Image (cartoon, coloured by chain):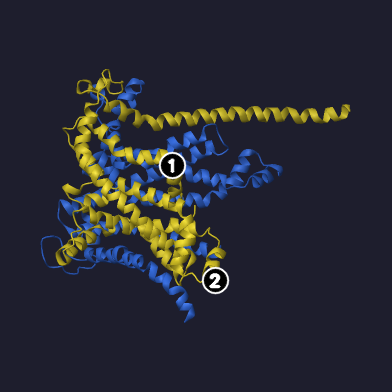
Chain colours: A blue, B yellow
Amino acid sequence: MTRVRRWLPGLLLVSPSIILIAIFVYGLLGWNFKLAMTDKHDEIAEIPGNFVGLENFTGIWSEERWGLSVRHAIVFTVVFVGGALVLGWFLAFLMEKGIRAEAGFRAVYLFPMAVSFIATGVVWRWLMNSATGEQAVGLNRLFHYLGLDFLQWQWFRDPDWGMAAMAIPAIWQMSGYIMALFLAGFRGVPEELREAARVDGCGEWGVYRHVVLPMLRPVTLSALIILGHISLKVFDLVVAVSGKQIITDVPATFMWTAVYDSHDPAKGATIASYIVLSVAVFVVPYLIWDARKGKRS
Amino acid sequence: MTAQVAEKAPRTAPAVRVRDRRRTGTWVRFALLLLFVLVFLIPVYVLLVTSFKPLTEADPAQAWNLPKVWTTEAWRVAWEKLEPGIVNSFLLAIPGSLISAVLGSLNGYVLSKWRFPGADVLFTLFLFGMFIPYQGVMIPLVQLMVNVGDTLGIQLYGGIPGLVLAHVVYGIPICTLIFRNYYVTIPDELIEASRVDGAGMLRTLWSIVLPVSGPAFAVVIIWQFTSMWNDFLFAVFLTGPSSWPTTVMLNNIAGAVTTPYSQQMAAAILASIPTMIIYVLLGRFFMRGLMAGALKG
């Protein structure tokens, strides 16, 4: 009884948050999945819709636009996650041993994180304007100045690799963050360990390869999780750069049009469910692993 | 004597060479970092230069030139169009970030110092809320808010209170995480001593924990303010024309074909000024929020 009295007040104090999370996170997720399994394809109808099982989940694959948006999301994710990871790591690698004006460099690389994708999307849409030749503005015009006209292309309007261009602003925005993560990781490697490896005859590259790199694994995993879940739900950036064009459609923008233009709640919920599942498959194991690790330490 | 010199000579020569190599290495790294600074600042140059150009210079051939005539006309028009959104964003982000901080502080305190059985599992369940793509709850959330309005008469959908609620609820995980990680560093003996003195949970929170919570409050308020200011997804689903925050208004201004580039760019800068000021003045706290987002990384 006394033990209960010891922890009960704590539970009561968190209970508002528990209730909110239970309703708004888990309750609404459940509601969304339930809606996705109905035939409520018209939002005006008062009837809640009949249960149809996984019909919407399988049916959507026969829609050309869905296949396109999934393909786009994959191209975007590969280029964005790979690009931000490599650039962020490289910037941290250049800075890890200390460099003059380090604080200034960090401030510049990180500032895009403080600004919204909507605001940066405005300037990136200009930079990646698809006009070429005389009408070229933005980067195409810059290539012309530099005598690199052959580099001019359609950017995000390119039907095959447009989403790779769409990843460029995202890399610009996020690689400073990844740099900060890696820099913290580099600085977490004790100098004695590096020294010990040097005494054992390791060259600088050997020290890096055998001592530093293995210790960066947890940071790399965190970075992958962060970039991955941002990438799979990317929405603002695509809307800001190209609006609702099918050529840059991703699941999140497809869902938006399903809800507001097609007025089809069940379809919107189905797409939303797929977005949640694509993130959950790697975030849930990560969180469980993280919780276990926390318990051990 | 001679033997000693002979012994030392071959040692110093490579040492000098290593130092030389290190120095050139440092310069190469510095030059590369500087190059990346220039690349990172390209969008900033475009934003500033274009926003000060008069309409007569909106010719692709002059796209990258400095304005011949500097004018603030575009800024004036952009401000007129954007002002209601900026007011709404402040009405959203100021109360929202304060409520978030209070909830996060309570939760973090209990989950670190006044634990109850199952607190760890609960914390992990909270954390999942940080990673879910909000698309997964959006359709039911709109429905729930409409229902609450219909049955209870509390108008949440389409207004700023509903948007504040959404941001506060979905901000609980990150705010709890930041406060919990901060409070873990307060020695348990301090809490225990307060208990022995007969102080209850709230008394201890008030007189022991809160007085040292300043930095955590700064981190959470800045983090929440920035994410509420920059959010587009919740805003576009939950608000109507009279309650549109900055991001939605900016997207409408910039998305209109008739808006000249100079006005688009000026509006993008105006929309980013509040978070940029925070970043410049309080970057230290902003960084800590970012790092907390990487879980234990």
Give coordinates of residue A26: x percent, y percent: 32, 65
Q: Is residue B221 left or right of residue B55?
A: right
Residue under the image location 53 percent in, 47 percent down: A185
- B254 over B235 or under it: above or below: above
User: Is A40 in front, or is B214?
Assistant: B214
Task: Indicate the chain on which mark 2 is placed.
Answer: B
Q: Residues within 10 Å of mark 2 (few under 14, many from 20)?
A: few
User: Is B81 in front, or is A236?
Assistant: B81
Q: Is residue B113 left or right of residue A77?
A: right
C-beta proximity under 8 Å, tags 1 and 2: no
Mark 1 = which residue? B283
Give coordinates of residue B31: x percent, y percent: 51, 27
Residue under the image location 55 percent in, 33 percent down: A99
Residue sticking out furthest to the top: B68
Q: Is residue B106 left or right of residue A238?
A: right
Task: Indicate the chain on which mark 1 is placed.
Answer: B
Residue under the image location 61 percent in, 28 percent down: B23
Of helix, strand and loop, which one carries label 2? helix
Give coordinates of residue A118: x percent, y percent: 28, 41
Residue sticking out furthest to the right: B1
> Where residue A93 is drawn, which disc sits there?
none
Residue under the image location 46 percent in, 70 percent down: B200
> Where residue B196 is drawn, which disc sits there?
2
Comparing labels 1 and 2, the label whose residue is closer to the camera: 2
- Report the Cα–Cα distance between label 1 and label 2: 40 Å
What type is the residue that disc 2 sits on? Val
Residue A197 placement: quadrant = top right
What type is the residue that disc 1 sits on? Gly
Residue B280 placement: quadrant = top left
User: Is A160 in front, or is B199?
Assistant: B199
